[in-house]
Amino acid sequence: MSLDHILLGLLREPASGYDLRNAFSGSVAHFWSAELSQIYPTLKRLEERGLLRSRLEPSPKGPDRRVYALTGEGQAELRRWVRNGPAVGTERFEYLAQLYFMDAIDDLEQTRAFMTALRDHLANRLAQLRAIEREIIAAHGDAPERYSDAGFHRFVTLRMGIHSIGSKVTWCDLTLAAIDRRLASPPGPAS
């Protein structure tokens, strides 16, 4: 998956770069992140490729804003990408790399602090996603198969985020319990 395709999907409704940044802070945050420093160059490249067009519009605050919209070619590329089957790639989790090399500091208490901070972060994100889920269910009922097409697809994506982060919180709990057992009874010399 690339930022290109995420932006094409978000731009089914015209939006400014700032509007897109807000989408990365909200609706798509549980599966993709991007900063303005990545968004604007990608928008420019997509426009140069003919997948987007832009126009200046008056802004309610400050200078005019550039609003981007899909072209026919952009819509075709989005459809091609979605129809191409699951794009399963390698996920990167920097915190796992940090944990993998945590023995470099030779301090299990530091590992415990690291895992506690990670668990707190993930649990907070999980709580946010569950709150969104409750709001959607309160507004539309607990039968996603009856939601609009867009609502259905967004809801099942949200549920994947909930399950994924929930499993990571469980893993943190199991790891913290293992650390506590290790602290209580340190292993003998390596064999």
Image: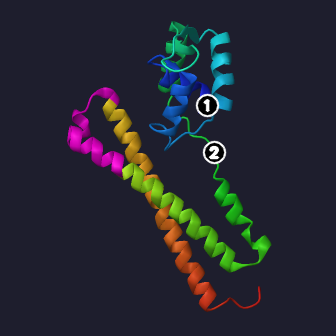
Is the residue marked by circle 2 packed among few (<14), some (14-19), or many (20+) residues within 10 Å?
A: few
* Residue at far right of view: 104
Q: Residue at x 40, y 49 (%)?
A: 129
First to last magenta residue range? 131-150
Instruction: Quarter of the image for the C terminus: give it.
Output: bottom right
Q: Relative to 92, is 13 on the left or the right?
A: left
Q: Position of residue 8 (x, y in %)?
A: 53, 21
Q: Residue at x 51, y 64 (%)?
A: 120
Q: Is residue 154 above or below residue 81?
A: below
**Res 100 → quadrant:** bottom right
Q: Main secondary structure of the magenta part?
A: helix
The three-letter code of the residue at mark 2 reads Thr
Q: Is residue 48 above or below residue 62?
A: above
Q: Position of residue 72 (x, y in %)?
A: 50, 7
- Can residue 84 be seen here? The reply is no
Q: Identify the residue under disc 1.
A: 2
